Image: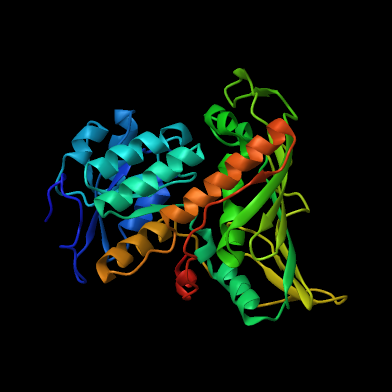
Amino acid sequence: MVSASAGTRNELKPGQRVRVGIAGCGNIARPYAESLVGYEETELVGVTDLDPARAAALAESSGCRVYPDLDAMLADDDIDLIVNLTVHTAHHAVSTAALEAGKHVYSEKPLALSAEQARELVALAASRGLRLGCSPFTFMGAAQQAAWRAVQGGSLGTVRLAYAEVNWGRIESWHPAPQAFYEVGALFDVGVYPLTILTAFFGPARRVSAYGRVLQPQRRTKDGDEFTITTPDFVTAAIELESGVLARLTTDFYVSQHSKQTGIELHGDAASLHLASWQDPNSAVEVAPFGQPYQPLGDFSEAKMRWGTGVHDLARAILAGRPHRASGEHAAHVVEILCAATESLTYGRSVDIGSSFAPPVLDGIGAEA
């Protein structure tokens, strides 16, 4: 279709398929691949990883080719879009290389580890006429969309306060290589989920005040290797949104995911809403008029998690010529919030936020998530 050095993908039309390459074949690559081979708009062409055996195993199970390295994948004219599933610290470099090679990019979160790098990626994609998308896509989930409809429909009245809880447990209890997660910290790794939902619902943030510390510095992998963490494994932040909503976000890599403090609470003049999970599309959603008990908003138990949802939406947007929903601009704004929170907890003062983004649309496709 288009050479790897080209700046746009205008040749892609409805009825064609967006040809995808996955960079990084870690834990989440397999569910991504399983989703992508099931969509009629996407074709999984190949995968690559620093570990050739890991890439080969994913390619065999997915029926696609293996590239010996990222450069080989980026040089292939058969690839339209790179799904960047590398470690957090490599996101910026891999996405930059892909965009410079003329490929659309969908990155796992966070988009980058600094606001400057995130802005660089947005500007690079725009200058090349390419799409830049980023997780999390979970605001498209069925339960999350229902919560959003309740907000937009006015049943909560004016929403003034939001609580978001991310008790994500001890990564070493389930992940074979937890050190990379602790290097970036709970705020950057999982704080992005509720922040993306809240900013999708209520718009950009304007000021952040945060506190954080290391709760448990000494950790041990599943294989028994000891390691020490220095990035805060607990952060709490007060985030003032432009719409007037005040959000309190708590993130940690210490308290079990079975904590009774879960999900997102929205509190308005007329009613409150509890979204039990900011991640799962089949989450319980409850609404309570002020002073009354919570009642289910609906039953979303049949909704399924499909890790390729964000990539699927991006592919459909390319083919239809419409904006995609998990945008690079939104992801860059979330990175700025994360960086502002880190600056705040480091220096003990509030930090202003200046960026904005075009809000994603609420169009009901979340039932596919």
Image coordinates of residue 140 in percent, x first then y, are: 50, 65
Q: Which colour scheme is used?
A: rainbow
- Residue beneath the point at 31% across and 44% down: 22
User: Is 181 situated above or below 16?
Assistant: above
Count how many numbered circles sit on residues in the image. 0
Answer with left or right where residue 329 lies relative to residue 22. Answer: right
User: Which quarter of the rendered picture does the N terminus lie within?
Assistant: bottom left
User: Is 287 situated above or below 74?
Assistant: below
Q: Quadrant of residue 256?
A: top right
Q: Is residue 211 visible?
A: yes
Q: In which quarter of the image is residue 313?
A: bottom left
Q: Is residue 253 visible?
A: no
Answer with left or right where residue 14 lies relative to residue 118. Answer: left
Image coordinates of residue 186 in percent, x first then y, are: 63, 39
- Residue beneath the point at 27% across and 66% down: 40
Answer with left or right where residue 284 lies relative to residue 107. Answer: right
User: Is 266 situated above or below 112?
Assistant: below
- Residue beneath the point at 57% across and 49% down: 192
Of residues 317 and 44, which is closer to you in this image? 317
Image coordinates of residue 25 in percent, x first then y, are: 37, 38
Image coordinates of residue 208 in percent, x first then y, are: 68, 47
The residue furthest right is 291
